[in-house]
Image: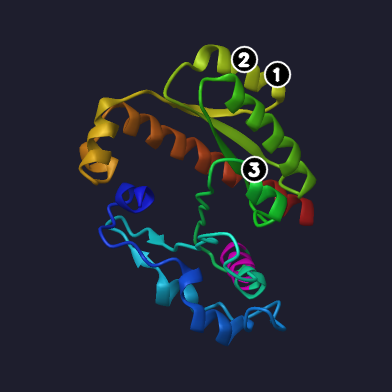
Amino acid sequence: MNLASSLGIENPPKPLTEFKDLIEERAGAEGGAFIYNPKVDDIAGKYGVIGPDGVRMLVMGTVDKGGSGCMCPASAFLRALLRHLMLREKSAVILDMEAGIEHLGRGTTRGMDIMIVVVEPGARSLETAERIKKLSSEIGIKHIAAVINKGGAGKVNARLEELGIPVLGEIPFDQQLMQADLEKRAPIEIGGDAVDSIVKIKEKLIEIVEEIRKEEEASKK
């Protein structure tokens, strides 16, 4: 699992959707009635794995194959967990989504402060970014930004500006990232230009989120 090794976690947690008994106990059985708002406030503590830098990782899970059964209870369980993490917990929550736009159609991203789109230097990636911006606004995500991956920021930057998507930064192509991936080590342990860029992106993201929070607080007064 790439994300786990990137965080320095050697033994990643099992996907929550594999805990069939837990989901049935909390949300109901497949094919029958299910609980829309199951108890989830203890899930992160029990089923998350903490990495070396204090980041707690949870793996939501997905359908492994077609015809594997109704996912209504599992979907209700995962949606409730996401709502709890994003609206009740005080920690920062980062959702690492699969590439594409399917998760936007399911509405699992509601309640986010900001959507970050990783854009490759190519036309198809830019088209996807444009679609993500449109869908994000339709489900209530007001803020979206891009990170340009593997360099080539010049023309990509210009197109993103046309689309109204601000750029947080650029991650250059870096052999040290490939080395970290092959060795299943966290990139931050190896360092390099890409990691330096990611740190700057993180700092800029924190500033943006703080501004968003201030705007939200001001609007409530």
Q: Earlier in the sequence, mark 1 or mark 3?
A: 3
Q: Nearer the viewer, residue 22 or 88?
A: 22
- Residue drawn at 68 percent across, 78 percent down: 37
* Residue picked out by circle 1: 162
- Contact between marks 2 and 1 (CB within 8 A): the answer is yes
Q: Residue at x 78, y 56 (%)?
A: 220
Q: Amino acid at mark 2?
A: Ala
Q: Is residue 33 left or right of residue 176?
A: right
Residue 18 is left or right of residue 106, and the answer is: left
Query: Does dot 2 land on a helix, a strand or a loop?
Result: helix
Q: What residue lies at 50% left-to-right and 82% top-to-bottom?
A: 22
Q: Give the residue number, with chain letter if any, for mark 2.
A: 158
Q: Nearer the viewer, residue 16 or 86?
A: 16
Crowding near pointer 2: few (<14 within 10 Å), some, many (20+)?
few
- Numbered label attached to residue 101: 3
Amino acid under disc 1: Glu
Q: Say which quarter of the image contains residue 49.
A: bottom left
Image coordinates of residue 25 in percent, x first then y, are 56, 87
Q: Residue furthest front?
A: 67
Callout 3: SS: loop
The part of the chain drawn in magenta is 77-86
Q: CA distance from mark 2 to mark 3?
A: 23 Å
* Rendered location of residue 133, percent (x, y): 70, 36
Does the rendering let one see residue 221? Answer: no
Point out the frontmost of discs 2 and 3: 3
Q: Residue furthest bottom?
A: 25
Q: Residue at x 65, y 71 (%)?
A: 70
Secondary structure beneath dot 1 equals helix
Between the C-alphas of marks 1 and 3, the distance is 21 Å
